[in-house]
């Protein structure tokens, strides 16, 4: 098996204020983990990205939670990859289910955003995942593969080296209902097979596929044991000291 560096992202979503974010940064700065074994990235709300970047230990990278597919211009409320890079972010989360389902971002728009972010020099946590009714209708593979295809059609093969794929079943996000290790492994394995067939055997073996959806300090170890689960994208638990336990899930 190819060695893929374990990857743990913390998606803080629209949570926190200066005080609580300051405390969380202290927890992260004091937490023990081995940066040669695990890559750690946190995504604060946009307004705090620069502040977090300045106060956080350098072994933890900073991400934005979305960014637009243009460098600048008349896009009220948006930020560009260039701005993210300017304040020290190295990553963007793109295609999160809340962007897709609450803000109506289409597969096509998300593919454009992934393309533009990568071309601008950001690395991308690209999120995919099915709704509960899609899972119940047996459409999980079809949905996640269609989401992958949009991005495959938009970016070059070389660009995939800066992509981490985050499988986040929508029914597991913020619900306390985690996919079982077997359910997650099944989808991750299908994604890796799709990559081998549609991208290359090399990309299939090196690309990290991480799981998101109610990951916590109790369930992370069993999930991390699965062959095709290369880490996590964590929401609620990334706001707590539990995040340090999750970072160390594989050690
Ligand atoms: O959406 C998520 C991470 O991006 C997952 O959120 P929860 O861990 O709160 O379920």
Image: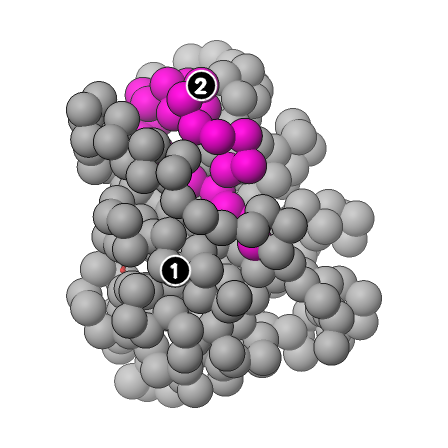
Q: Position of residue 86 (x, y in %)?
A: 55, 15
In what element is the residue under mark 2?
Answer: helix
Report the side of 106 relative to 119 (left or right): left
Q: Position of residue 4 (x, y in %)?
A: 67, 63
The N terminus sits in image quarter:
bottom right
| 248 within the magenta span | no
Secondary structure beneath disc 1?
A: helix
Which one is nearer the viewer's eye here, 153 or 163? 163
**Neighbourhood count class around disc 2 (C-alpha, 10 Å): few under 14, some 14–19, many 20 upward:** few
Q: Position of residue 245 (x, y in %)?
A: 36, 59
Residue that mark 2 sits on:
54
Nearer to me, 239 or 176: 239
Residue 3, image quadrant? bottom right
What residue did someone put label 1 on? 246
Q: Dot 1: within a 10 Å radius of its alpha carbon, few (fewer than 14), some, or many (20 or more) residues?
A: many
Residue 228 appears at what percent x and percent y?
Answer: 58, 75
218 on left or right of 78: left
Residue drawn at x 67%, y 78% as measured from the top left = 193
The magenta-colored residue range is 38-60
**Of 221 and 164, the residue lying toward us:** 221
Residues at marks 2 and 1, CA–CA distance in whole angstroms: 24 Å
């Amino acid at each position: 098996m190819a060695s893929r560096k374990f990857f743990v992202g913390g998606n803080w979503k629209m949570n926190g204020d200066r005080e609580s974010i300051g405390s969380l940064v202290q927890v992260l700065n004091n937490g023990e983990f081995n940066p040669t074994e695990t890559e750690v990235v946190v995504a604060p709300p946009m307004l705090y990205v620069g502040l977090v970047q300045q106060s956080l230990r350098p072994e933890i990278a900073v991400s934005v939670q979305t960014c637009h597919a243009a460098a600048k211009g008349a896009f009220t409320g948006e930020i560009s990859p260039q701005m993210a890079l300017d304040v020290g972010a190295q990553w963007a989360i793109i295609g999160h289910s809340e962007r897709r389902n609450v803000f109506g971002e289409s597969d096509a728009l998300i593919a454009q955003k992934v393309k533009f972010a990568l071309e601008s020099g950001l690395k991308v946590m690209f999120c995919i995942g099915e709704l509960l009714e899609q899972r119940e209708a047996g459409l999980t593979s079809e949905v996640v593969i269609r989401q992958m295809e949009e991005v495959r059609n938009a970016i070059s093969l070389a660009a995939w080296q800066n992509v981490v794929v985050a499988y986040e079943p929508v029914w597991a996000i913020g619900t306390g209902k985690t996919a079982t290790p077997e359910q997650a492994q099944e989808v991750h394995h299908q994604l890796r097979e799709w990559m081998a067939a549609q991208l290359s055997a090399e990309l299939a073996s090196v690309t990290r596929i991480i799981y998101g959806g109610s990951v916590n300090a109790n369930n992370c170890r069993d999930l991390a044991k699965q062959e095709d689960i290369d880490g996590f994208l964590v929401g609620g638990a990334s706001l707590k000291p539990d995040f340090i336990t999750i970072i160390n899930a594989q050690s």
